[in-house]
Amino acid sequence: MRYFRLKNIYLKEGIMVRNNYGELIFEKNLGEEPKDPLEIWLDIPGEYRVLGKKITLRIIEKHEMKKDKNLRFFNGDLLENKILLRHRKDGDTMRPLGMGGYKKIKNILIDRKIDREKRDKLLIFQNNKDIFYIGEMMISDDYKVKESTGKIVEIGIFEEDKNDRE
């Protein structure tokens, strides 16, 4: 018997079935066309609203680093003044914190059992050609803050407050 790995099965009346790690998910297929890929240049420092998220980029001192689930800290000595925010692309790689080598982002997401539908919506932060942050998930070992780091960049990703819209 041969098994085929299907991404989605479309049933009558706009119902779509997909397999999410052994769990069948039934959804109403809205027939939405794929949107243009996300590619936004962000200035450091800066504050942005993207896809229902508030993204803050600040230059801080070491003593300002605090533990917060919404904040990540990076070696600003390595970052340009403009970074690219985008969605993932085929073949993307990064060096996860604590790993010696590079790993495909696709494999990182599979290992973490991230739902297929969510994978393409994750925010990817890129400096030149290096991916240094998978938003709200993982930082690159290459961009971690070290004892010798002079400039620290704090990136915050927050759910957008509906009362905070301008």
Image: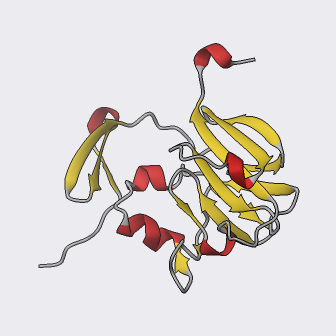
Provide residue 87's location: percent of width, then percent of height. 62, 55
Position in image of residue 72 (x %, y %): 61, 52
Colour setting: secondary structure
Residue in the foreground of this view, choosing between 103 and 150: 150
Residue extending farthest top: 163
Q: Which residue lies at the image location 77% right of the left edge and 51% below the top edge?
A: 61
Q: Quadrant of the C terminus?
A: top right
- Picture layout, residue 3 above or below residue 162: below
User: Which residue sits furthest front?
Assistant: 63
Rendering coords of residue 13 (x, y %): 31, 32
Q: Decide if residue 36 is in sight here.
A: no
In this orientation, which residue lies closer to the viewer: 151 or 3? 151
Q: Quadrant of the N terminus?
A: bottom left
Q: Residue at x 62, y 61 (%)?
A: 133
Spot occupied by residue 154 in the image (x, y as percentages of width and height): 70, 50
Please name the residue shown 64% across and 43% down the image: 156
Residue at 26% x, 45% y: name it.
25
Q: Nearer the viewer, residue 88 or 111?
A: 111
Q: Nearer the viewer, residue 148 or 45?
A: 148
